[in-house]
Amino acid sequence: IEKPSFASKRTARTIRLIGDPETRYREDPVRMLRAVRFEAKLGFSIHESARAPFATLAGLLEHIPPARLLDEFQKLFLAGFGERAFDLLRGHGLFGHLFPATEEHLAAEPDGMAIALIRAGLRNTDRRVAEGRPVTPMFLFAVLLFGPVSAAAQRRFETGMPPAAAIAEAVDEVVSQQNRRIGIPKRFSIPMRELLSLQPRFHRREGRRALGFLSHPRFRAAYDFLLLRAEAGAEDPQVAQWWTEVQALPPEQQRERVGHEEGGGGDEQGPRRRRRRRRGGRRHRAPPAET
């Protein structure tokens, strides 16, 4: 890709390719993604001669090794201009060749929850990059794949499958399909599955299970995702507000808060059952521990 030219007002801030664009793209289709990355990062525009072949050559991206596209994904979405890159990829007809299930879901529900969640997640990621805070592909994959995952999970909900199991199976299904385009390593896919599978637990706000959830190793990532879902209209904002407030309380007040929620005073298994006495009368005591 040629460096942008500033020779005249007509050519200023324009991205061109050295040589014939179609030939160059056929040599390496990833050059199309690089052109979009420069367009998003620099705020330049791609010259018509370099942009026109996208319509006929975008399918060549499907033959690129998934591991290589993972590297391009991180450069596009984790460098501080992810939301603009997303818009440009969709506008140029390239996004669907990277995330086919997501593009199909967005086409079916153009103004639905999934697009609102993606925008909220990308803005949040861009903001974190600008502030010098860490970002992870795991979280962004969860954001970009949540639409098709939620649809796959819904099909399982309707068969009576428990929510956590349904979501875990749905994640495995969607990730298996996605790996054919962008390879998602297990170091990302496993915690992503756990993050999404934890979402139903935010509706359990009483008893020991609620308190224990606060110390779960994936709680913070799951909570951040909950906030995005609430922002996108995919979750009751009061649920997110409750967990925001309870985290700020001292431990004693946390115990009091979950004990006074509706149905509280016990864990999610309901009232504690009386222990059955052993058959034959009195209960046998365990022998004293050896010292």
Image (cartoon, rainbow, N blue to C red):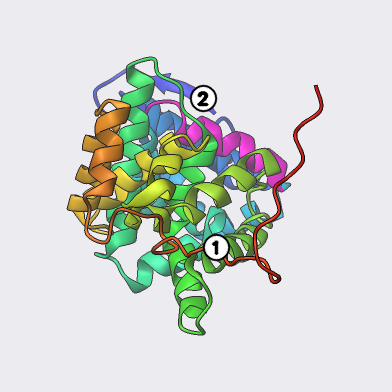
Q: Nearer the viewer's eye, disc 1 or disc 2?
A: 1
The picture quadrant where one finds residue 223 is top left
Residue 117's disc is none
Alpha carbon of mark 1 to alpha carbon of mark 2: how far? 77 Å
Is 51 positioned to the left or the right of 43 in the image? right
SS assignment for the magenta stretch, majority: helix
Query: Is 77 covered by the magenta stretch?
Result: yes
Single out the residue that lies furthest toward the right.
Answer: 290
Q: Which residue is mark 2?
A: 2
Q: Amino acid at mark 1?
A: Arg
Query: Is 249 covered by the magenta stretch?
Result: no
Pinpoint residue 17: horizontal percent, then vertical percent. Answer: 53, 33
Q: Secondary structure at mark 1?
A: loop
Pinpoint residue 148: horizontal percent, then vertical percent. Answer: 47, 65
- Give the class, few, some or many, for how many residues have Cα within 10 Å of label 1's Cα (few <14, many ≥20): few
Q: Quadrant of the C terminus?
A: top right
Q: Which residue is mark 1?
A: 275
Read off the magenta span: 66-80
Residue visible at 22% across and 48% down?
231
Is 26 positioned to the left or the right of 164 in the image? right
Residue visible at 50% across and 56% down?
197
Q: Amino acid at mark 2?
A: Glu
Examine the rendering and report whether any part of residue 119 can be seen. no
Q: Quadrant of the N terminus?
A: top right
- Give the class, few, some or many, for how many residues have Cα within 10 Å of label 2's Cα (few <14, many ≥20): few
The picture quadrant where one finds residue 200 is bottom left
Pinpoint residue 195: horizontal percent, then vertical percent. Answer: 50, 47
Pinpoint residue 162: horizontal percent, then vertical percent. Answer: 51, 71
Q: Secondary structure at mark 2?
A: strand
Q: Is residue 202 above or below residue 73?
A: below
